[in-house]
Amino acid sequence: MLPDPTESISEFVLPSYKKILVMHDGKDKSNKAINHAIYLSKLSGAEILILQIIDDARKLEGTSVNISSNQESSSSSLPSSSSTISHYSSSEVNKRHYEKNIEGDLINSMEEKIKKIEQAGCKSKVSYKFKTGNIVDEIVNEVNEMNYDLVILTSSHLNSWIESLFSNTRKIISNIHTSVLIPH
């Protein structure tokens, strides 16, 4: 059996990062993962997407979502503390544009993080996305739907082999085909 060429050591098979997904759980521990993303982005020029999965509605306290119909283009003027998610209805007859404006502490906190990332010297595109639902399912879906070169996860110290066997991190890694970095 011939060896896999991607497993050899050569300048032709070195990894190339264009898109890095960083998981953020809203805690300061996630900053370690962001710091790794900044460093790798500085080396490779990769864009960074910060993903936060919200599995508990109580975490949305102080956040509001406003949905409005808009016939104009998606470049409408919004306050700096809002995140805009745009989509078109599936009806072929009515191509009305909808905007969802998310405002509040959650958005302000993430935008402050992006400012700090830029202050740390990251010159690449940095964006963020919020999803609601099961943490493992949402991360796996995001990674499998988009073309990420690297996923950076955070993981708390695991006390035993049994805990690591059933951890969210292990479930995610076993369901994606992308390189993963887990800073401790």
Image (cartoon, helix red, strand yellow):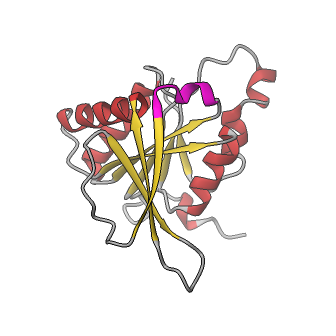
**Most foreground residue, 42 or 128:** 128
Residue, x 73% and y 40% (percent of image)?
171
Residue 137: horizontal and vertical position, in percent?
70, 46
Residue, x 60% and y 25% (percent of image)?
58
Hey, which quadrant is residue 164 in on the image?
top right
155 relative to 10 in the view: left or right: right
Extreme top residue here? 159
**Most foreground residue, 33 or 67:** 67
**Most foreground residue, 101 or 45:** 101
Residue 178: horizontal and vertical position, in percent?
57, 54
Specify whether residue 60 is painted magenta. yes
**Most foreground residue, 84 or 52:** 84
Hey, which quadrant is residue 14 in on the image?
bottom left
Residue 153: horizontal and vertical position, in percent?
53, 36
- The residues colored magenta run 57-63
Residue, x 20% and y 48% (percent of image)?
123
Hey, which quadrant is residue 42 in on the image?
top left
Q: Quadrant of the N terminus?
A: bottom right
62 relative to 92 in the view: left or right: left
Residue, x 33% and y 53% (percent of image)?
47
Task: Using the image, determine if residue 108 lies above or below residue 98.
Answer: above
